[in-house]
Image (cartoon, rainbow, N blue to C red):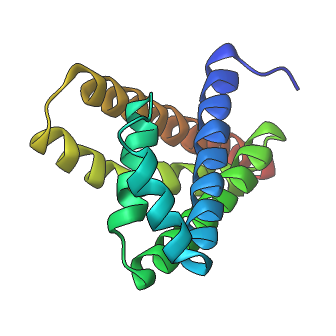
């Protein structure tokens, strides 16, 4: 099965996103078990963090309550695992995986549009456009595969 460059790029983006979520899940799980240590470490190192993403993550961990950290760990881990499973299924051309990945991408679009509305920057705009394009691409591919497989089976 030959994959288009668009499919390869979209799967790579989703795999990186899923791995990031799994990392966030692991950090959150570690944080709730070592809450005092992480809070102390974050408060000492947040000013010297070189990257805004690191600073944002440390601030989030420092300000999050224990129940919030547990929720972040569980939701991020589940979502990341589902994206990885769907991406692998798409790679092998499974219709269920196209449906799952389309639904997973669609589930975050309302949050991304809300973030775009609250913080209109070129980075946020680009991210929303990329994810909207991925949603439309996988939606079309899902429709095309289901239409073709129904045509073949009749």
Q: Residue at x 47, y 48 (%)?
A: 105
- Residue lying furthest top: 5
Q: Is residue 99 visible?
A: no
Q: Position of residue 39 (x, y in %)?
A: 45, 66
Q: Quick check: 104 left or right of 93? A: left
Q: Quadrant of residue 129?
A: top left
- Residue lying furthest right: 1
Q: Residue at x 36, y 30 (%)?
A: 127
Looking at the image, which is closer to me, 48 or 66? Answer: 48
Looking at the image, which is closer to me, 122 or 92? Answer: 122
Q: Position of residue 15 (x, y in %)?
A: 67, 40
Q: Residue at x 66, y 63 (%)?
A: 26
Q: Position of residue 85 (x, y in %)?
A: 75, 55
Q: Quick check: 94 left or right of 35? A: right
Q: Quadrant of residue 4?
A: top right
Q: Quick check: 42 left or right of 146? A: left
Q: Quick check: 52 left or right of 93? A: left
30 shown above or below 3: below
90 shown above or below 126: below
Q: Residue at x 37, y 78 (%)?
A: 65
Q: Is residue 18 visible?
A: yes
75 shown above or below 84: below
- Residue lying furthest bottom: 67
State the count of labels.
0
Question: In which quadrant is the N terminus drawn?
Answer: top right
């Amino acid at each position: 099965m030959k994959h288009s460059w668009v499919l390869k790029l979209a799967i790579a983006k989703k795999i990186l996103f899923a791995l990031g979520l799994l990392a966030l899940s692991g950090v959150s799980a570690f944080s709730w078990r070592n809450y005092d240590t992480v809070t102390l470490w974050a408060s000492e190192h947040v000013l010297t963090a070189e990257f805004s993403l690191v600073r944002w993550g440390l601030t989030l961990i420092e300000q999050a309550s224990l129940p919030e950290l547990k929720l972040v760990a569980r939701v991020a881990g589940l979502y990341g695992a589902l994206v990885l499973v769907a991406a692998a299924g798409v790679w092998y051309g499974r219709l269920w995986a196209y449906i799952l990945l389309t639904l997973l991408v669609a589930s975050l679009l309302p949050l991304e549009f809300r973030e775009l509305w609250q913080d209109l920057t070129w980075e946020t705009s680009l991210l929303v456009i990329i994810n909207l394009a991925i949603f439309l691409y996988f939606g079309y591919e899902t429709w095309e595969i289901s239409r073709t497989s129904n045509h073949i089976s009749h």
